[in-house]
Amino acid sequence: MNTIPLIFNERQIKRTSLGGSFDKSKAKMGVSVVLLGRGGNHYKAKMLDTLVQSGFESIISIEKDHESYNIDNLSSRFPEVKFIITLEKLNIGEMINIGIEESSAEHVLVLWDDIKFSASTLSPNLAEKLIALHHYCIVPRLVTKIQGMPIVTSPSALSSKFQVSRNSFVKDGEITLYPFDFVGLFDKEKFITLGGYDYTIDSPYWQNLDLAVRSWLWGEKTSISTAFQLIYDGTLPVEDQTANMSELRFYLKNLTPIFKYDHGVLPSSAFFRYMMHSSSGFIEAYKRFKDAQNWTNKNKYRFKTDIVTLMENWGNQEDEK
């Protein structure tokens, strides 16, 4: 059983890198880019060319070892880009953690290479305005060629069971529970303080939701900018919300702790309720519960609320500065 990481990038990943000779003095904005691959090489080259021309402080392209056959060519064409080739099998959160760690700017835009991006998508003026919000994450308005996407998400409960509600109608500055498909402009310092993505959660959906809900419970905010819009050029990703061990870890870390006086606590009384839903034996369930209890205790003073209070006050979040 992998224990919950207590610090950012606790697991060191074997990797190598190429390029990254960009002169920071030529940057037009204090934003780095972490580019994740999904669309294939014909998407990537065009995306990299646009990103280089846009004036980011640094560009980090995360490459999987078995898909890195053309990196030498891309590195020669785009010496400004730092290509990081991972030598181990990683999940999405781990790749983003590496990219944000390697980024030089204080704010980092996470993108996929099958998303349309032009030089006007994120201008220096718009970047400055978004950064001035001091939010943990700014989510762009995501659309397809024919319609908007349900990126407005909020926590809710159905028969006392946590669920995520979705809406396609977006207004500028509206809060959202998490960044769909991991895409967003992140505050690097806040991201690292939150611990980044938990690499022990393999499911992309639960991994994304884990960090996002934790950010809210620890007093951070994620909002949407309608002035910042991205268009999906390829097939839309499907969020697999299957209940599995990833969902159980998310449950222990985010839904079970309660806020008491000035700190978070995972009460021992919650164990038997967890065990009933864990589909595992007593010993295994107890180990996982104690691991989450230890993690909660280590971070107890970072909690500013619990999930019940967050849901009760969700409608008031937008009015808070």
Image (cartoon, helix red, strand yellow):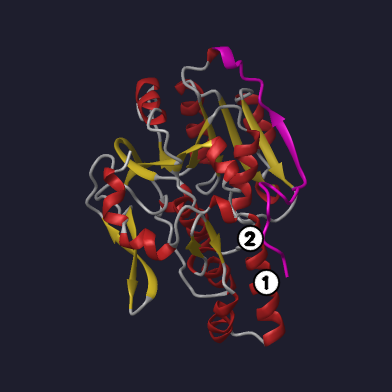
Residue 45 on image: x %, y %: 53, 33
Q: Answer whether residue 24 is magenta in the image.
A: yes
Residue 82, position as x, y percentages in the image: 65, 30
Quadrant location of the N terminus in the rendered image: bottom right
Q: Quadrant of residue 34?
A: top right
Mark 2 crowdedness (10 Å alpha carbons): few <14, some 14-19, many ≥20: some
Across and down, in percent, residue 203 comes to 55, 64
Q: Using a 10 Å C-alpha cutoff, classify the residue at mark 1 as few (fewer than 14 neighbours), some (14 to 19) or many (20 or more).
A: some
- Residue at point 28% right, 40% down? 173
Q: Mark 2 points at which residue?
A: 297
User: Label 2 sits on what residue type?
Assistant: Asn
From the viewer's perspective, tell me whether residue 305 is left or right of residue 65: left
* Residues rendered magenta in the picture: 1-25
Name the kind of residue labelled 1 in the image.
Lys
Q: Quarter-wise, where is residue 244 in the image?
A: bottom right
222 or 102: nearer the viewer? 222
Q: In this view, does 156 lie to the left or right of 217?
A: left
Q: What residue occupies the far top of the structure in this picture?
A: 25
At 66% from the left edge and 20% from the top edge, which residue is drawn?
21
Q: What element carries label 2?
A: helix
Residue 214 screen position, x and y as percent: 50, 55
Q: Of circles 2 and 1, which is in front?
A: 2
Q: Which quadrant of the rendered structure holds the C terminus?
A: top left
Residue 198 on the magenta segment: no
Q: Nearer the viewer, residue 119 or 129?
A: 129
Q: Can residue 232 be seen in this view?
A: no
Q: Reply above or below: 100 against 238.
A: above
Q: What label sits on residue 290 in the rendered view?
A: 1
Q: Residue at x 53, y 83 (%)?
A: 273
